[in-house]
């Protein structure tokens, strides 16, 4: 199945006219870079929490099952956040490519 690319962030429509407004590709690139960094921080935080819960499950055997569940949830969050960081990295690259192709350096 062919992959469909959506570049909804590249053109913003003016309210009064049907023509696309001018896009600030440098601003879009900076925006995606910021979101990528936040997602990376989320990945690190969730990974650290997963390791903490893993340690707690060994340290507190009476509540080990509860800690194991929290560890697994944190691991899933870390993977999801990492995937979002990967997505934003590619959006940032696309914005950079668009900026360069439009002659804005």
Image (spheres, helix red, strand yellow):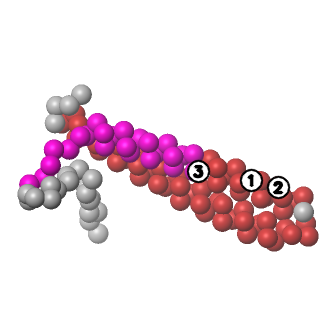
Report whether 20 appears left or right of 4: left
Q: Which residues are magenta?
A: 19-42
Q: Examine the residues drawn in magenta and state their main secondary structure.
A: helix
Report whether 70 appears left or right of 38: right
Residue under numbered circle 1? 51
Quadrant housing the C terminus: top left
Above or below, comparing residue 42 to residue 75 in the picture = above
Verify whether residue 9 appears in magenta.
no
Q: Residue at x 38, y 45 (%)?
A: 32
Residue under numbered circle 3? 43
Q: Sequence order check: which comes first, mark 1 or mark 3?
A: 3
Q: Residue at x 64, y 49 (%)?
A: 45
- As helix, strand or loop, the secondary structure at mark 3 comes to helix
Q: Is residue 86 visible?
A: yes
In the depicted view, which residue is nearer to us: 62 or 2? 62
Which mark is on residue 55?
2
Q: Is residue 93 visible?
A: no
- As helix, strand or loop, the secondary structure at mark 1 comes to helix
- As helix, strand or loop, the secondary structure at mark 2 comes to helix
Q: Sequence order check: which comes first, mark 3 or mark 2?
A: 3
């Amino acid at each position: 199945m062919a992959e469909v690319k959506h570049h909804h962030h590249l053109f913003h429509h003016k309210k009064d006219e049907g023509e696309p407004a001018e896009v600030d590709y440098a601003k879009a690139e900076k925006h995606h870079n910021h979101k990528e960094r936040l997602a990376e921080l989320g990945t690190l935080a969730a990974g650290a929490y997963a390791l903490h819960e893993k340690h707690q499950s060994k340290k507190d055997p009476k509540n080990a099952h509860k800690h194991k569940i929290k560890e697994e949830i944190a691991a899933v969050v870390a993977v999801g956040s990492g995937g979002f960081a990967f997505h934003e990295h590619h959006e940032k690259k696309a914005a950079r490519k668009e900026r360069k192709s439009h002659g804005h350096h």
